[in-house]
Image (tube, rainbow, N blue to C red):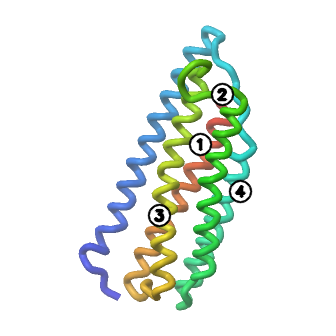
Amino acid sequence: MELTPQQKAARPLLYLGLASIAMSFAGLTSGYVVARSALMAKSEWQTIALPAWFYASTAMVALSSGLLYRAQRVLKAGTAPTREMLVVLLLGLLFAAFQVMGWSDLTSQNIYFTGAGSRPEASWLYVITWFHWMHVLVGNIVLAVMLRRTRKGYYVGAKQLRFTLGAQFWHFLGFLWFYLLGFLLILR
């Protein structure tokens, strides 16, 4: 199975994009650390308990990633993983919905992103999780395209590479969420 020049370039381009995303989050988490340190030195940092919805969303992304790995194996075996992809997409959408519910919990506790009553630690929490959520939104679009193409029998031969790259993007977003959740738990 000979890859076209475009297909050969796809993997390095994905990795370049993932590196850019990782660097963006490195910058955000570095900013968080600096702001936290400055405010803690003045005893002005307040710890925010993460919403339970964030933990529920973690379960969704873990399950979706595991099922997507299974879908990759099914596809490599020559069968279209349509059911698996449908469930992966549903889990991805639940992840996004649970994040929104988490933000709703925060606002019900009077923890706001901006405006009267907002605090820097809350603003950082919202920005970091919202920025990830925006990437998850793109990830869900990728999953929807993958499901549509799976249903149409698109992923045969060299085209399986596109499925693999979409899966790698989703796995990266899951790994990134685990990093962010751990970061926010340790440095509250």
Q: Which residue is mark 1?
A: 180
- In the image, is 10 to the left or to the right of 93? left
Q: Report the Cα–Cα distance between label 2 and label 3.
A: 30 Å
Label whose residue precedes the other's in the sequence (4 or 1): 4
Mark 2 or 1: the one toward you: 2
Residue 173 place in picture, x, y as percent: 53, 55
Q: Report the Cα–Cα distance between label 2 and label 4.
A: 24 Å
The residue located at (59%, 53%) in the rendering is 96
Q: Are discs 2 and 4 less than 8 Å apart at CB?
A: no
Q: What residue occupies the far bottom of the structure in this picture?
A: 78
SS state under label 1: helix
- In the image, is 98 to the left or to the right of 169? right
Q: Report the Cα–Cα distance between label 4 and label 3.
A: 20 Å
Q: Which residue is mark 4?
A: 59
Q: Are discs 4 and 3 less than 8 Å apart at CB?
A: no
Label whose residue precedes the other's in the sequence (2 or 4): 4
Residue 22 place in picture, x, y as percent: 45, 46
Mark 2 or 4: the one toward you: 2
Q: Are discs 3 and 1 less than 8 Å apart at CB?
A: no
Q: Which residue is mark 3?
A: 141
SS state under label 2: loop
| 45 w.r.t. 77: above or below | above
The residue located at (62%, 80%) in the rendering is 83
Q: Which residue is mark 2?
A: 111
SS state under label 3: helix
Which amino acid is tagged 1?
Leu
The residue located at (52%, 57%) in the rendering is 172
Label whose residue precedes the other's in the sequence (2 or 1): 2
